[in-house]
């Protein structure tokens, strides 16, 4: 059972890697937009995170504060992706504050996943 939990954890981190990688490509590119790959990365991270939040019969307590903080950050990232995609469709450019917030919050959420024990 522990192996399966670690496998889901791997998918959770891969989801953040996809989201952050797509963001970094847009940054280096100079385009600074919201892509479909960012949405996929967010979806993978969200689904895997919700599965990880379920009780697995593990010997230690789940850190519900950490789970709550990560969920709130994930929802904010999703909102920013939606705002950015909407602005991109209408005006062609994602506001710099929205674009940079997506990257910073994604990195923060991945850091929380790895560093907060």
Image (spheres, rainbow, N blue to C red):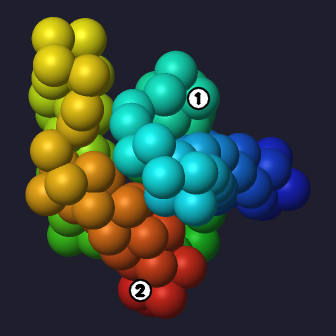
In the depicted view, which residue is nearer to us: 101 or 45? 101
Is residue 6 shown left or right of residue 53? right
Tell me where residue 116 sits by quadrant.
Answer: bottom left
Q: CA distance from mark 2 to mark 1?
A: 27 Å
Query: Which residue is under mark 2?
Result: 116
The answer to whether any part of residue 67 appears in the image is: no
Residue 25 is marked as none
Query: Who's the residue at 39% across and 37% down the image?
Result: 33
- Report x, y in % for residue 74: 29, 47
Query: Which residue is under mark 1?
Result: 37
Query: Who's the residue at 39% across and 32% down the image?
Result: 34
In this view, 100 is above or below 55: below
Residue furthest out toward the right: 3
Tell me where residue 100 sits by quadrant.
Answer: bottom left
- Marks 2,1: beta carbons within 8 A: no
Q: Regarding mark 2 in the picture, which secondary structure is present there?
A: loop
Is residue 4 shown left or right of residue 58? right
Query: Who's the residue at 46% across and 79% down the image?
Result: 111
The crowding category of the residue bearing disc 2, from other C-alpha atoms within 10 Å (few below 14, some 14 to 19, many at least 20), is few
The answer to whether any part of residue 87 appears in the image is: yes
Q: Regarding mark 1 in the picture, which secondary structure is present there?
A: helix
The crowding category of the residue bearing disc 1, from other C-alpha atoms within 10 Å (few below 14, some 14 to 19, many at least 20), is some
In this view, 37 is above or below 59: above
- Report x, y in % for residue 64: 26, 64
In the depicted view, which residue is nearer to us: 14 or 61? 14
Q: Quadrant of the C terminus?
A: bottom left
- Report x, y in % for residue 37: 59, 29
Residue furthest out toward the top: 90
- Report x, y in % for residue 49: 48, 45
In the depicted view, which residue is nearer to us: 45 or 62? 45
In the depicted view, which residue is nearer to us: 105 or 6? 105
């Amino acid at each position: 059972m522990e192996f399966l939990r670690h496998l889901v954890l791997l998918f959770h981190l891969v989801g953040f890697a996809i989201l952050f990688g797509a963001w970094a490509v847009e940054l280096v590119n100079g385009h600074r937009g919201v892509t479909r790959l960012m949405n996929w990365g967010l979806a993978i991270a969200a689904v895997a995170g919700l599965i990880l939040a379920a009780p697995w019969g593990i010997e230690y307590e789940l850190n519900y504060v950490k789970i709550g903080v990560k969920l709130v950050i994930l929802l904010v990232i999703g909102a920013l992706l939606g705002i950015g995609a909407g602005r991109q469709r209408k005006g062609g450019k994602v506001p710099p504050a929205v674009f940079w917030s997506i990257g910073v919050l994604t990195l923060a959420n991945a850091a929380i996943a790895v560093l907060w024990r």
